[in-house]
Amino acid sequence: MNRLWRKYLALLDTDFTTQVFDNIKNLLVCALLFAAGTNVLDREHHLFMGLLASNLAGWGLILVSAVLMLLSVSDGLRRLSKLPYHTAFQIILFLIYLVLAVRVVEIVWVFRA
């Protein structure tokens, strides 16, 4: 138990919690952008006083969200690859992160209404 506590304290010293919260914050921003983009595609609002087509703005938000999500996932994979754990454990963590990312997007998309 003492060894686990020292490991936990070492993780706190390396700003582990700030990295986790930053990653979750990035995930939520991507989910909100995706939900906003799909909301624009779902409804026919005239944005910017009719100067920009709604579909273009919706697809633009979805594209920005996808790029940001890809950057966040690749940053998470890079950080996981530096850990001294087995590759199978890293793949399992990545799959869990991917499932959580999709679920967060779905939840935010449902709450947009």
Image: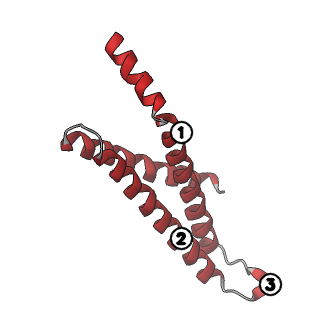
Q: Can residue 33 be seen in this view?
A: yes
Q: Where is residue 105 in the image (x, y as percent from the top left)?
A: 51, 54
Q: Which residue is drawn at 41% across and 26% down?
A: 10
* Residue most extreme to the top: 2
Q: Residue at x 59, y 83 (%)?
A: 56
Q: Position of residue 32 (x, y in %)?
A: 60, 58
Q: Name the element at disc 1.
A: helix
Counting other residues with Cα less than 10 Å from the Cα at mark 3, is it few (<14), some (14-19), or many (20 or more)?
few
Q: Name the element at disc 3.
A: helix
Q: Where is residue 87 in the image (x, y as percent from the top left)?
A: 20, 44
Determine which quarter of the picture holds residue 7. Answer: top left
Counting other residues with Cα less than 10 Å from the Cα at mark 2, is it few (<14), some (14-19), or many (20 or more)?
some
Residue on which the image places disc 3:
49
User: Foreground: 104 or 110?
Assistant: 104
Pointer 1 or 3: first along the chain: 1
**What amino acid type should be assigned to the residue bearing mark 1?**
Thr
Colour scheme: secondary structure
Determine which quarter of the picture holds residue 41. Answer: bottom right
Mark 1 to mark 3 CA distance (whole Å): 41 Å
Q: Which mark is residue 64?
A: 2
Residue on which the image places disc 1:
18
